[in-house]
Amino acid sequence: MAASHELILVAGVLCLFAMLAGLFSARIGTPLLLVFIAVGMFAGEDGPGGIEYSDFKSAYLIGSLALVAILFQGGLSTERRMIRQALWPSVALATVGVGVSAAIVGAAAHWLFGLSWVEALLLGAVTAPTDAAAVSVLLHLSRAAMPSRVTAALEVESGLNDPMSVFLTVGLVEVLTSPDGLSVKEAVLLFVKEMGGGAAIGVASGFALMWLFRKLKVERSVFPVVAVGGALVIFGGGQTLGASGFLAVYLAGVIVGNSRHSAREPVLRFFGALGWLAQIALFLMLGLLVTPHQLPQIILPALAVAAVLILVARPVGVLACLTPFRWRTRDMLFVSWVGLRGAVPIYLTIIPLLAGVSSGYRMFNVVFVVVIVSVAVQGWTIAPVARLLRLSADK
């Protein structure tokens, strides 16, 4: 019992300290998510806290639960006008853009680390998705003036691109760990099942939740509890059926958030707070998982991978996806720069670790460095880049 009480005390202290440190640092423009990770590292085995945490199975569970809250909240916050403005550009970025980014980063990783092509592409796949939490939080905190279409594309893309990365990650892990690998036919079927199944489950579940909210005659405080249970069922059910629970829970959130019903306001308020708690828990956990004394061994090639991702892979992917929609060059450059990586890439590296991929630990450390660089460099410069490109809000 004493150990349980101490664990609860430590969790509470870390949560409060991370939030207070984040609010203080926000005054000088420090990205909040970077602060949360730093607090986790400070409390970890190489820091003064000395907490040893390397249980990747529990980390995968905690990460999944946190992402359910973050993605559902992201869907709730996605307004109908944002979807009208940027649906197809966002879909292109979330599919083709992810594939282009994974291929370019994979080629760089193959040369920098001497990984096999499959391992290198796996590293590219896990670094490819932008992060819904990082994009949403840092865009709003930057207070940068930008066209609504640009904001819409960035936020909708970050909610849609996880399934493509999960598909690539799972497929490449299957190739690495299965003697027979994965045939082209099996890969196509996996893609259709992940994306099509996730979309179908998400839309159907969103309307089912909306119907339930309208039929329930209960106190308003009960609705958020129903929403939490529904989000968990949607994600868990989708994943169990082999579809993308990430896509399903995001789309269900979009439908619930854009429908008129008595539960909308209490659910939005509750998930606004729960989303923050999930972000704090997720980034603290990732800070605890990393072992800082191992990072110097891979720091230089990891920084090179980060540079390739930010300066080459992301811009090429964005130009390939948005040029057909006749976007202005300055808007495409801004979308390229705000391709923020966050918790999702680190979370995805847990999949090859649990599958027993031999290069899994090195991959985890590399991706951690890439995320830190992305949040620090890109997150810190959103507003200056918007001014440099002379972006302005819609009139």
Image (cartoon, grey):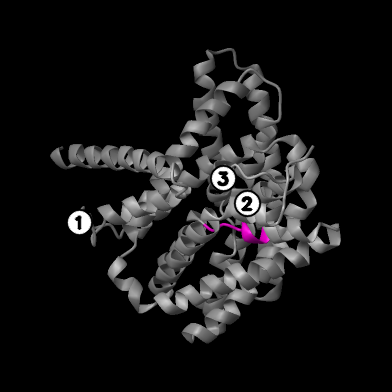
Q: Is residue 169 left or right of residue 39?
A: right
Q: Earlier in the sequence, mark 2 or mark 3?
A: 3
Is any part of residue 329 visible from this angle?
yes
Question: Residue 158's mark?
Answer: 2
- In depth, the one of 98 and 56 nearer the eye is 98
Q: Residue furthest left?
A: 2
Which quarter shows the C terminus?
Answer: top right
Q: Nearer the viewer, mark 2 or mark 3?
A: 3
Q: Which residues are magenta?
A: 335-341
Q: Secondary structure at mark 2?
A: helix
Q: Is residue 363 above or below residue 214?
A: below
Q: Earlier in the sequence, mark 2 or mark 1?
A: 1
The residue under label 3 is: 142
Q: Nearer the viewer, mark 1 or mark 3?
A: 3
Amino acid type at circle 1 is Gly
Measured in 3D between alpha carbons, the distance from the residue under mark 1 to the one under mark 3, in whole angstroms, is 34 Å
Amino acid type at circle 2 is Ser
The residue under label 1 is: 50
Q: Secondary structure at mark 1?
A: loop
Q: How many marks?
A: 3
Q: Is residue 266 magenta?
A: no
- In depth, the one of 71 and 385 nearer the eye is 385
Tag 1–tag 3 contact (CB < 8 Å): no
Q: Is residue 131 above or below residue 7?
A: below
Measured in 3D between alpha carbons, the distance from the residue under mark 2 to the one under mark 3, in whole angstroms, is 17 Å
- In depth, the one of 157 and 63 nearer the eye is 157
Q: List x then y, in percent, for residue 219.
A: 52, 13
